Amino acid sequence: MKRVNKKQKSSLIKSSPFTVAVAIAIFVIGVNLCMLVSLLYVIVSPRFEVLSTSTFVIMGAASVLNILILLMLLVLRRIYESIVYKKILIPLREIEKHIADFAQGEYENPVVHDENDEIGDLFKAVERVRNQLIEYREHEKNEERVKQIYISGLMHDIATPITRINGCASMIEDGMVKDEESIKRFASMILRNTEDINIMLKSLAAIEKYNETDIVMDFQPVDLSSVLENYVNDFNLSSSDVTITFADNCKQKSVTMIDIKSCKRALTNLINNSVKYKKQGEDCVIAITLEDSEDGKILFSLADNGVGVEPGSEDMLFEMFYRGDRARRNTNEGSGLGLFIAKQILSLNNIAVWAKNNGNGLTVYALIERKSNDNPL
């Protein structure tokens, strides 16, 4: 950026109305001097006999007065230039420096001015712009952070359907599934998991293409009991070392409005968390239950027989990259993203989630809004 020398006069002063006023004053004084010269000629000319002492005094006084007026105007112009430089030009150059800093992405220095005048108002306006730029930069950083978290979550969750596909394909290849009905069922599971992978890949492509971090939710009425029963049956069919039981203890129909695809992702993450942190030498047993809450909502619970967590650290389970105590950190699996992603997904579905030790493992609870009866499924 080009720096203006402090001693350099600005064109603002050179072209100021004050300069025009001085020029007019000089013109007036010049006319007066011409009149005085003419008067002097009349006085000293032999053709006229008007010579007197009072005439010379008046002429001298008028000349001195004109000279004093000219000097006074010149002094006033210098004072005006000094005031303009101090009150206007120096603050404007300071604002110019701040704007140059903004262009370089530097917003640390506040824009302040001591005077409460028009220039002060300009400084306040520039300060507001600085604050807005800071907020925009923080918003941009947060958007990028959310984007990276969402991408990491999708990459984390893609591994689950891939593992299921591999498991189903291996069982078919090893001849463990022989009858045609079972083969069709396994093929159907492979297709569903392939569809889940495609959905996640499309989400990744949309984020990269449009730089969007918002997840599009497709809320529809869902019968949780039916969905969970089918999910558990499919899971038990494809897994040999994990057993999941399901019980619907609700007296009312367990119908809610959710995005079923994203909620299945969250449920898968919850189950994977229980599997990863099971007790060594024991099979993983998971019990999923639906109950009526006191306020008429649906209370979902997922209880496992794993290592649990340290008392008092249950709320931290859903923080990003949290791995818990040594019993949970010793595992070679787990990135600390699974429960964090599950909570983010459930929050988007207006579902509150928390966890507690159950004395023989960990129980995750979720409170789900029940769909009103006046809108049947």
Image (spheres, helix red, strand yellow):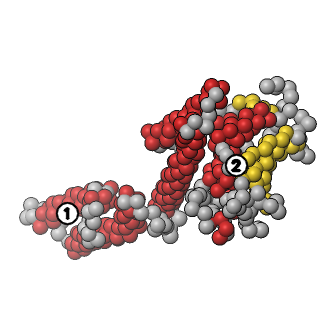
Q: Which residue is mark 2?
A: 242
Q: CA distance from mark 1 to mark 2?
A: 114 Å
Percent across and percent down for residue 9 are 26, 65
Q: Quadrant of the N terminus?
A: bottom left
Kindly tell me whether residue 332 is visible in this rendering: yes
Q: Between residues 186 and 205, which one lies in front from this camera angle?
A: 186
- The answer to whether the residues at label 1 and label 2 have Cβ atoms under 8 Å apart is no
Label placed on residue 104 = none
Residue carrying label 1? 33
Pick the front one: 49 or 27: 27
Secondary structure of the residue carrying tag 1 is helix
Give the percent coordinates (x, y) of residue 373.
86, 28
Q: Quadrant of residue 267?
A: top right
Amino acid type at image mark 2: Val
Q: Earlier in the sequence, mark 1 or mark 2?
A: 1
Q: Residues within 10 Å of mark 1 (few under 14, many from 20)?
A: some
| Amino acid type, mark 1 | Leu
Task: Report whether residue 154 is seen.
Answer: no
